[in-house]
Amino acid sequence: MECLFCKMINGEIMTDKVYEDGDTLAFLDANPSAPGHTLVVPKVHKSNILELSEYELNNLFKTVQKVTEMINKNLKPEGFNIGINHGQIAGSRVPHLQVHIIPRFKDDKGGMIQMVVSNKPKEDNATIASRIMAGEELPDYIKRQIKDYHQEEKKEEAKESEKEKRSEEEKELEEREAELFPPRKNEVNSREFKKKIEEKEEEEEEDIYDKMLKRMRIPN
Ligand SMILES: [Zn+2]
């Protein structure tokens, strides 16, 4: 294979190797930007992270972490820029995925990773985010959250309809009770009662009047 990195992996070209395992190789960049500038590559010939399997991706980034740890411990930089040039436009010169680990030292005249491009978006971020999300399969944890939400909603609905059912049953019971035990017609009763009392009072009054008349009877 004509790939430069594949040749390094096969041992056809010498490298300044700093780490190697079954799936990955790490070596110093031949044209370093800083002391300890290292490239980590997968042993399979793939051009970018989109082509990697989950297994290959895990191994690659495990090695990135391992080598960063080694450099950190032994060269004692103050920080790192770690990144990938994905595609020719982004500066990739070898079509074999490589992760750059660039140690950062005081006054090294470097910048931050955001400085590699200056292309301010014309759309707002919300629009761009929705474009990125468009047609995307939602992650499992969000699907689970949605499922849980719908289940809760169904539970609430069930509770509500249970409540409605119960209040309907209560209504029916009340109606049946009303049929079986009709409410007393208090108003009519009390009116009748009042009438009776009045009649009685009138009678009594007449009696008293009679009695008084008798007492007051003037001798003829
Ligand atoms: Zn290759």
Image (spheres, grey):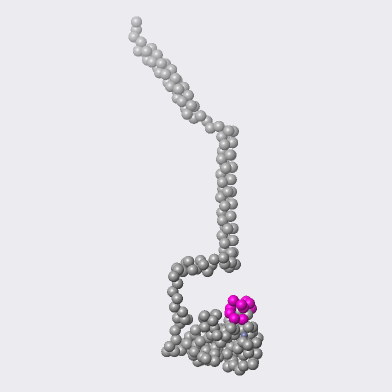
Tell me if residue 194 comes above or below residue 134 in the rendering. Answer: above
**Residue plotted at (56% across, 87% down):** 39
Residue 51 in the magenta stretch? The answer is: yes
- Taking the image as shown, residue 61 lies to the left or right of residue 110, namely right
Extreme top residue here?
220
The answer to whether residue 147 is seen in the rendering is: yes
Residue 70 in the magenta stretch? The answer is: no
Tell me if residue 27 comes above or below residue 58 in the rendering. Answer: below
Tell me if residue 99 comes above or below residue 194 in the rendering. Answer: below
The answer to whether residue 66 is seen in the rendering is: no
Q: Nearer the viewer, residue 182 or 47?
A: 47
Tell me if residue 162 comes above or below residue 177 in the rendering. Answer: below
**Residue plotted at (55% across, 85% down):** 93
Q: Quadrant of the C terminus?
A: top left
Magenta residues, as a range? 46-55
Specify the quadrant of the image occupied by residue 109.
bottom left
Q: Nearer the viewer, residue 70 or 99?
A: 99
**Residue plotted at (63% across, 83% down):** 45
Query: Looking at the picture, how far across and down is residue 71, in whole percent?
Result: 53, 89
Report ligand 1 position as a quadrant: bottom right
Q: Quadrant of the N terminus?
A: bottom right
Q: Nearer the viewer, residue 181 or 99?
A: 99
Query: Looking at the picture, how far across and down is residue 202, in whole percent?
Result: 42, 18
Q: Nearer the viewer, residue 72 or 106?
A: 106
Q: How many labels, in total?
A: 0
**Residue plotted at (57% across, 90% down):** 27
Query: Looking at the picture, how far across and down is residue 146, in whole percent?
Result: 57, 62
